[in-house]
């Protein structure tokens, strides 16, 4: 257990109040050291960088819960498996790591999968890192929407996952809107890119602009100042370097970069339409 707090408390108390102060400082320092020790042992806590076991837990939970949500609609389809495989490709998972992810997906779709226990363990490991929980939830929404249709049972399952991670119903609904907008926005971006090199590029559709606002978490009625603030907040929460420092597994960095690019593209579109400098 750390002793730095005890030493500082002891000598500071001794200097201020002699022996009684030293004893009081020692006790306060012990409380400080104990709290620090607990956070150090908690997983993704703020006092130390996460290790390989904790990052492996992140990957396992991502794919296990992905399998569980896929199963919520009744059965896991070939499309669900293709989506999970696509995520593994985007993360460049190879060898044993990829096989572990496949095993995790299969475990998640089993009837006896313990969602509460798995997310409880994961949430404790992410203590002090809400950004990691947001990234995790965003990946689950992306996987659900990639199927092209969100079943009511899957939506309810996503709500349960969000609640178990400590998010409110309002936050979950916002995540849902942002994930759907992100899916639509990326689809439209692919269509826009098909005009690359041609003499005519169609202007952004009303729906695409609306999706851009939703990606930033605001509406079209927001002021320029509110839009700028929302953009900065989203970039801060999804910045790849910040997420890496907080414990995001290196395998997920490509997806973090893609998310940051999506936010940047949404901001650039809104900025152009509003004439923001």
Image: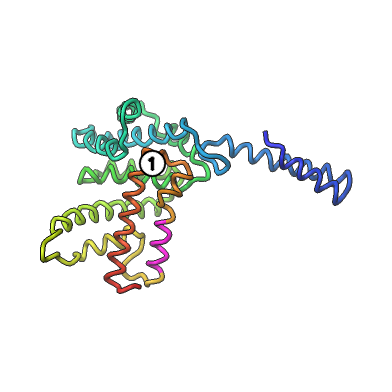
- Quarter-wise, where is residue 185 in the image? bottom left
Image quadrant occupied by the C terminus: bottom left
Q: Nearer the viewer, residue 32 or 115?
A: 32
Q: Residue furthest right?
A: 18
User: In the image shown, does 66 or 110 lie closer to the viewer?
Assistant: 66
Which element type, helix, strand or loop, lies under badge 1? Answer: helix
Quarter where residue 221 is shown: bottom left
Picture coordinates of residue 67 (x, y %)? 30, 33
Residue range highlighted in magenta: 226-235
**Residue tagged 1:** 161
Residue 42 vs residue 27: left or right? left
Residue 259 falls inside the magenta stretch: no
Q: Position of residue 51 (x, y in %)?
A: 49, 34
Looking at this rendering, what residue extends furthest in the front direction? 197
Position of residue 10 relative to residue 222, above or below, is above
Mostly what secondary structure, the magenta segment?
A: helix
Q: Residue at x 51, y 39 (%)?
A: 44
**Is residue 227 covered in magenta?**
yes
Look at 39% across and 46% down and name the residue there: 135
Is 55 placed left or right of 43 in the picture?
left
Quarter of the view holding residue 266: bottom left
Which residue is outermost to the left? 199
Residue at the location (40% across, 62% down)?
230
Q: Is residue 80 visible?
A: yes
């Amino acid at each position: 257990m750390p002793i730095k707090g005890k030493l500082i408390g002891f000598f500071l108390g001794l200097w201020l109040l002699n022996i009684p102060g030293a004893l009081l400082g020692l006790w306060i320092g012990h409380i400080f050291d104990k709290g620090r020790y607990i956070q150090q042992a908690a997983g993704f806590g703020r006092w130390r960088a996460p290790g390989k076991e904790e990052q492996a837990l992140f990957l396992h939970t991502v794919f296990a819960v992905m399998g569980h949500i896929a199963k919520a609609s009744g059965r896991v389809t070939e499309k669900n498996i293709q989506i999970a495989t696509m995520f593994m490709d985007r993360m460049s998972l190879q060898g044993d790591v990829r096989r572990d992810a496949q095993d995790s997906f299969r475990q998640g779709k089993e009837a006896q999968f313990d969602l509460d226990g798995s997310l409880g363990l994961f949430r404790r490991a992410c203590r002090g890192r809400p950004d990691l929980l947001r990234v995790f939830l965003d990946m689950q929404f992306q996987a659900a929407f990639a199927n092209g249709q969100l079943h009511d049972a899957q939506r309810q399952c996503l709500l349960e996952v969000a609640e178990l991670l400590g998010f409110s119903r309002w936050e979950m609904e916002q995540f849902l809107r942002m994930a759907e907008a992100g899916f639509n926005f990326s689809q439209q971006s692919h269509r826009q890119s098909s005009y690359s090199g041609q003499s005519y590029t169609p202007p952004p559709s009303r729906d695409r602009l609306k999706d851009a606002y939703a990606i930033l978490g605001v509406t079209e009625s927001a002021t320029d100042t509110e839009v700028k603030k929302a953009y900065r907040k989203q970039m801060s929460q999804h910045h790849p370097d910040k997420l890496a420092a907080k414990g995001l597994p290196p395998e997920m960095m490509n997806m973090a970069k893609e998310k940051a690019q999506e936010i940047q593209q949404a901001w650039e579109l809104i900025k152009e339409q509003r004439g923001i400098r």
